[in-house]
Amino acid sequence: MIIYSFLTTILFMSANFFPDSLVAQDVTLLLPPQTDGGMPLMRALKNRKTSREFAGKDISAQQLSNLLWAACGINRPDEKKGSL
């Protein structure tokens, strides 16, 4: 949560230092993350492996939303706690 707050502050402050031509004008709203279903945690940990091959295709908006949520999402909003 601290890292998320820090990054948000940096992004906000950077908008004041860069010319408008360098600052993104459009905002893309992400889909809500899918937090149900999927593989059980222990099976995912057992089956994990490193891969050096990539498909070369774009990920979906849902996959992007899920990845960003897992990296820095607020998964317990009532307690104001995140996934970090």
Image: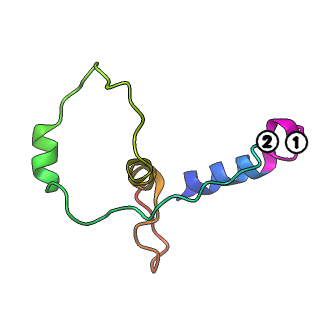
Region rendered in magenta: 13-22
Q: Which secondary structure lies at badge 2?
A: loop
Element at label 1: helix
Which corner quadrant of the image does residue 55 belong to?
top left
Which amino acid is tagged 2?
A: Val
Residue 81 x %, y %: 45, 68
| Residue to which mark 2 is pinned | 23
- Horizontal relation, residue 84 to residue 36: left or right: right
In contact (CB < 8 Å): disc 1 and disc 2: yes
- Is residue 32 found inside the magenta-colored segment of the image? no
Q: In the rendered image of this protein, does residue 83 appear above or below residue 59?
A: below
Q: Is residue 36 left or right of residue 58?
A: left
| Relative vertical location of residue 35 with respect to residue 43 in this rendering, above or below | below
Task: Check if residue 19 falls in the magenta segment.
Answer: yes
Number of residue marks: 2
In the image, residue 38 lies at what x, y percent? 19, 57
Q: Nearer the viewer, residue 52 or 6?
A: 52
Q: Can see residue 18?
A: no
> Which percent across, then down, holds residue 27?
67, 54
Q: Residues within 10 Å of mark 2 (few under 14, many from 20)?
A: few
Front residue of 7/68: it is 68
- Residue ID at (41%, 72%): 76
Q: Pointer 1: what residue?
A: 20
Q: CA distance from mark 1 to mark 2?
A: 5 Å
Mark linked to residue 39 = none
Q: Mark 1 belongs to which amino acid?
A: Asp
In percent of width and height, residue 24 lies at: 75, 44
In the rendered structure, the answer to whether residue 61 lies left or right of residue 49 reads right
